[in-house]
Image: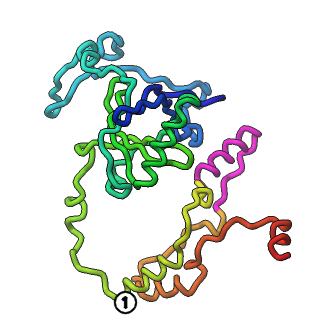
Amino acid sequence: MPARALWKGQLRLSLVSIPVELFSATRSGASVSFRQIHKPSGKPIHYEKVVEGVGPVDVDDIVKGYEYEDDKYVLLEPKEVDSIKLETKKTLELVQFVGVADISPLYFDKPYYLVPADELAEDAYRVVRDALRQSERIGLGQLTLRGREYLVAVKPCGDGLLLETLRYADELRKADPMFSDISGKKAEKELLEVASALIKKKTAPFDANAFKDNYTAALKELVKRKMKGKSTRVAVEEGERPERRGDNVVDLMSALKKSLESGEGKKPQPKAQSASRRRRKSA
């Protein structure tokens, strides 16, 4: 089934407007979701809107409430909320540019693919893409969608452009209170050198395919077996079972050095080549 555009409009850079379409870059179907089921009947459980001391209520009697103090609310009618929703705009203007490393990862929220709407838009689209890549910059703008205004970043991604929604500043918690109990003492020089050597030894290009969601894979396998009428328990492979360390204090230097000397410090190996490819290389 072809992907469906979430938004269609114009990507604007000064006086240049490029027809583009927006697509989600993630798949919701990759994860496993469940429904709650009433075991005796096998039927799904539904939820009712209830009020304590009143019981089930009519949907028309429900309004939004903002809790400004404990158990004290400001009531907002649906029409009042709808009146401040922003109209979806058909233009995304890049109003500022920043360095690729200038935005903290904390701000990035959700990725989308931004693609040219047709062949006529491709020339201008490529110019913006290549200019961003060459200048090592990210374009910033605000996109109005589904009644809300999103802060977004646009940057090169392979042959196209990636749009990522950004969190606003007031959506982030301050880091200082979280780290306030951590001493400002610097790491010991010898420990730092060994840890840095271990990091260097394990450094390799990022390949998402090298990592596997073992829980989701096991869950899907369990569901598949249950559908076939088998109720075999899922066993954890011995090699995947986490090591139990007990209460003994581990000497940090010894542990780091041992990691360097063992296979644990090796870089991830590329996928095995086929026999034919190995023969061609050795020829």
Count numbered badges in the picture. 1
Quarter the C terminus occupies: bottom right
- Residue at 65% of width from left, 68% of height from top? 238
**Whole-percent x and y of residue 214?**
60, 55
Q: Is residue 231 above or below residue 267?
A: above
**Whole-percent x and y of residue 161?**
49, 43
Q: Is residue 107 visible?
A: yes
Q: Is residue 77 above or below residue 212?
A: above
In depth, the one of 74 and 158 nearer the eye is 158
- Residue at 55% of width from left, 66% of height from top? 205
Category of crowding for the residue at label 1, using alpha-carbon neighbours closer than 10 angstroms: few (below 14), some (14–19), many (at least 20): few
Is residue 129 shown left or right of residue 80?
right
The quadrant where residue 136 appears? bottom left
Q: Which residues are magenta?
A: 215-236
The quadrant where residue 177 appears? bottom left
Quarter the N terminus occupies: top right
**Whole-percent x and y of residue 227?**
72, 38
The kind of residue on which mark 1 rests is: Glu
Query: Quick one: SS at disc 1?
Result: helix
**Whole-percent x and y of residue 263?**
60, 80
The quadrant where residue 254 appears? bottom left
- Residue at 32% of width from left, 28% of height from top? 148
Q: Which residue is mark 1?
A: 190
What scheme was used to colour the molecule?
A: rainbow
